[in-house]
Image: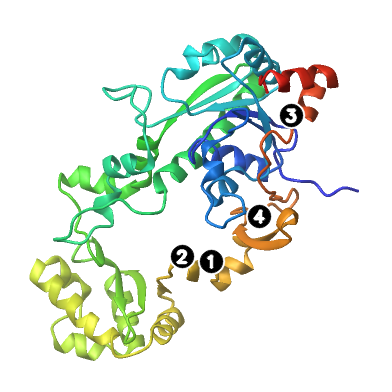
Amino acid sequence: MKEPHGPLQGVKVVACSTAQAGTVPYMLMADLGAEVIKIEVPEGGDNSRGSTVLPGFPSTYFETNNRGVKSVTLNLKAPEGRDILRQLVREADIFGQNFRPGAAEKNGFGYEDLRKVNPKLVYVSISGYGPKGPHADLPGTDSMAQALGGIAEAFSSPGQPMRTGIVSVADETCAILAFGGALAALTHARATGVGQKVDCSLLGGQLRLMGWTLTTAMWRDRNPVTGQARVTGTAERPGLSASFNDRDGKPLVFQLDGVRKWQTAMTALGFYETLETAGFGSLGVMHESEEKRAGLLGLLDKLFATGPREVWVEKLRAADVVAAPINTLLEAANDPDVLANGYVTEMEYPKHSKRLKVHGTPWHFSETPAQIGIAPELGADNDSVLARLGYGADRIRDLKARKII
């Protein structure tokens, strides 16, 4: 008996999407068993195919965002290309696009166009700023959303310029929200027979990512304290999440709340007596003044610099305090918990006779496990997909010759 592949078996997706936020939602669906047909421009394909870092190997950007999908090339400026797209949409559950606002409508595959073809269709549209507002018609990027959404401040240090980060958190957050939104709408469509349009944006996702920290800033009407420490709660019930370097400059973090937990943690480290003598027996003093906060953090800097990171983390964990080393990206990729859970795994690339490390899956399904694939060659699925629509070999060759596919 064939092992079930993912809980989304039977779901059909057509995606006219590029970049990260526009492709990751459907890549995740492919991991979970959905059939995802990616529409690409004939000959050139998705622009990100060319951004390789290993000569002769696929683009890491394209591979990460498009694994497990099927590639069909269509010239959507040609009537025949648009007709093929409508045939694919007729049998699809979900359609996705992240063109510049207005472009899909201009080219005949906006929501109102495609809902006429398939009333049950879930139509997912991803934009930079959202469907409303003064900049709704502008294109967007990850760095633009990071800049507007507050994360640059959240990870800034006092006195230092705010900067956007190298990891595409706005793209990825938007993609995960689009993934969830599409499946929520699909649940409704299957129950009622009525599809709908789902709008997601890079900016909207970034605001959601700010979570309770944004709520706190809005309620207090002031920006949060940033830097090496996140101070929360009140003097009576203080909380602290802070990072420090060990004697070799290797960083770690711990997080706790409550006066008792503070004493437990510092006692386990052997720091409590020194801290109490200096007037920091209670963590609540951090709420008294900026001077007290700086004094406590400065003393902790000196104490953590007396020993190795692995010892400090082990002592804190033994005392049931949340603590961890602060990994680099390469350290994260080799972290024992990451590897044990398959969050990073290896895939065979037969064309290159090589196994390479890739993202695993963030889910574990007990009955329908996910199964990851590799990204397709450009147009690899043209023949099989068009044959399924009733196109014969001669007609497919003609479409290729005229660059419709």
The image quarter in which residue 276 lies: bottom left
In the rendered structure, the answer to whether residue 43 lies left or right of residue 110 reads right
The image quarter in which residue 298 lies: bottom left
**Element on which disc 1 rests:** helix
> How far is mark 1 from mark 4, CA to CA?
18 Å
**Element on which disc 3 rests:** helix
Residue at screen point 30% across, 49% down: 151
Q: Is residue 309 above or below residue 29?
A: below
Front tag of 1 and 3: 3
Residue holding disc 3: 382
> Does residue 387 appear anywhere in the picture?
yes
**For the residues bearing labels 1 and 4, Cβ distance under 8 angstroms:** no
> Does residue 289 appear anywhere in the picture?
no
Q: Is residue 112 above or below residue 307?
A: above
**Element on which disc 4 rests:** loop
The first of marks 3 and 4 along the sequence is 4
Residue at screen point 42% across, 25% down: 100
| Residue type, mark 2 in image | Leu
Q: Residues within 10 Å of mark 1 (few under 14, many from 20)?
A: some
Residue holding disc 4: 364
**For the residues bearing labels 2 and 1, Cβ distance under 8 angstroms:** yes
Residues 127 and 166: in front is 166
Residue holding disc 1: 333
| Residue type, mark 4 in image | His
Q: Is residue 35 above or below residue 234?
A: above
